């Protein structure tokens, strides 16, 4: 049997949840059935995703981002799809406004087209009202086109399905899968990573992980910690991630007088181990398609406070608490009531997480691809 040529389209940016989904999911596809090639539409200054693709035996090409040179972006896709043949093209998107690649895939190839929605709102918004108006016009048009052109429609949640396709009809909602064994509590990693930060095993480490942009609400998380610190001086805040708000966050930490109590890690390829080092994770996102980070954190029995905008299916264990709204005092109150766990209390895996085993999700998606067309 000849392997099908599968093109995976995604941002391919270090630290991106969408990229992590790709690297979690597709290595479990049968290499005898699928020959994988990739196109990245994002900029990865770390080049870590290029190395990961090389290690997996995937060829990764990058298209100039549409936000940098829109005409060159559209032209590249047109030429690429006219001159390359694929059996399946799997588009991983956070919104629908850049529908040109899907449109050209439909026009110039006979490929089965998959559209997978990974978010419930834009990854980036403009402060300029005119730009937002045109973005919304493009996005609404894209919803109609993607809904009509996709042979298979997938979404990480009902909200993300409605966001991309404007309907739940014929959309399959699939939970993001994870490698459970990689995220189990690791006492050795806890000791070693805390030593890297120069903090003791008894100090309370409050964490945040995600792209430092408005939708992740990192400044709010910092403010919550600042208030918590007043009553809990034996605490440190760890912020893992990078993004356009980094310099503003550093400035605010300085203004709050907590700069020495805040640690930054721009990028790490061992976030799974850092969960073991933390005592609590704050995840106050303004909107989320799913919420992979709080799900991963629960595997290590890490206590999590998450906003109600995280997908409902992420709230699966007793270790995560849903908080409605962004009242800072309420978040501080909830943080203050958390009982800090011993290593022994974090050593076992909650059985309710077994359904998120990435092998199950990979099998489900692979079956969907084989059942269509």
Image (tube, grey):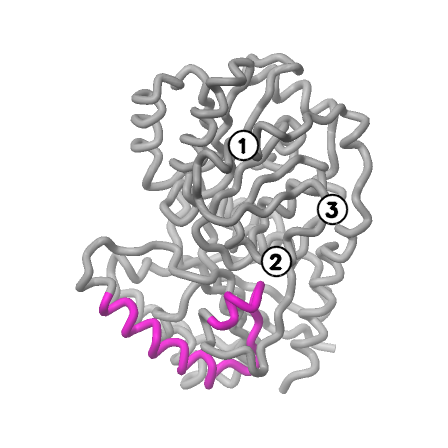
Q: Nearer the viewer, mark 1 or mark 3?
A: 1
As for residue 300 lying within the magenta part, the answer is no
Residue range (magenta)? 133-162
Q: Residue at x 45, y 69 (%)?
A: 163
Rounded to the nearest whole Å, what is the CA distance between mark 3 and mark 2? 20 Å
Q: Is residue 50 visible?
A: no
User: Residues under labels 1 and 3: Cα distance?
Assistant: 31 Å
Q: Earlier in the sequence, mark 3 or mark 2?
A: 3
Q: Which residue is mark 2?
A: 312
Q: Is residue 311 above or below residue 293?
A: below
Is 150 left, or right, of 24 in this rendering?
A: left
> What crowding class fits label 3: few (fewer than 14 Cα within 10 Å), some (14-19), or many (20 or more)?
some
Q: Position of residue 234 (x, y in %)?
A: 55, 14
**Is 302 in front, or is 226?**
226
**x, y percent for residue 225:** 47, 27
According to the picture, the residue beneath numbered tag 1 turns out to be 333
Q: Tell me the residue at 64%/26% (across/down).
A: 277
């Amino acid at each position: 049997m000849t392997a099908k040529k599968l093109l995976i389209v995604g941002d391919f940016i270090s630290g991106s949840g969408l990229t992590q989904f790709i690297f979690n999911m597709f290595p479990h596809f049968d290499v005898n059935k699928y020959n994988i090639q990739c196109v990245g539409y994002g900029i990865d200054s770390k080049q870590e995703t290029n190395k990961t693709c090389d290690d997996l035996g995937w060829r990764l090409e990058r298209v100039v981002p549409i936000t940098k040179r829109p005409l060159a972006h559209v032209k590249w896709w047109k030429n690429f799809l006219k001159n390359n043949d694929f059996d399946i093209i799997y588009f991983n998107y956070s919104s629908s406004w850049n529908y040109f690649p899907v449109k050209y895939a439909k026009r110039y190839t006979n490929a089965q087209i998959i559209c997978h929605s990974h978010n419930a709102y834009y990854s980036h918004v403009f402060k300029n009202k005119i730009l937002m108006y045109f973005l919304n016009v493009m996005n609404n048009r894209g919803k109609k086109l993607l809904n009509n052109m996709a042979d298979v429609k997938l979404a990480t949640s009902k909200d993300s399905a409605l966001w991309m396709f404007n309907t739940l009809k014929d959309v399959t909602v699939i939970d993001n899968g994870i490698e459970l064994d990689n995220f189990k509590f690791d006492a050795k990693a806890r000791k070693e990573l805390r030593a890297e930060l120069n903090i003791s095993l008894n100090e309370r480490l409050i964490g945040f992980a995600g792209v430092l942009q408005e939708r992740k609400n990192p400044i709010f998380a910092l403010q919550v910690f600042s208030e918590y610190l007043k009553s809990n001086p034996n605490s440190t805040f760890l912020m893992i991630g990078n993004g356009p708000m980094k310099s503003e966050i550093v400035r605010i930490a300085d203004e709050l007088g907590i700069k020495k109590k805040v640690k930054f890690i721009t990028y790490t390829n061992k976030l799974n181990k850092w969960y073991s080092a933390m005592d609590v994770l704050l995840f106050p996102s303004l909107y989320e398609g799913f919420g992979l980070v709080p799900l991963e954190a629960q595997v290590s029995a890490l206590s999590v406070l998450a906003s109600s905008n995280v997908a409902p299916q992420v709230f699966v264990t007793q270790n995560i608490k849903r908080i409605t709204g962004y009242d800072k005092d309420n978040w501080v109150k909830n943080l203050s009531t958390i009982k800090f766990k011993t290593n022994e209390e974090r050593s076992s895996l909650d059985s309710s997480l077994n359904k998120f085993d990435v092998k199950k999700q990979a099998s489900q998606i692979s079956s969907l691809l084989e059942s269509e067309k």
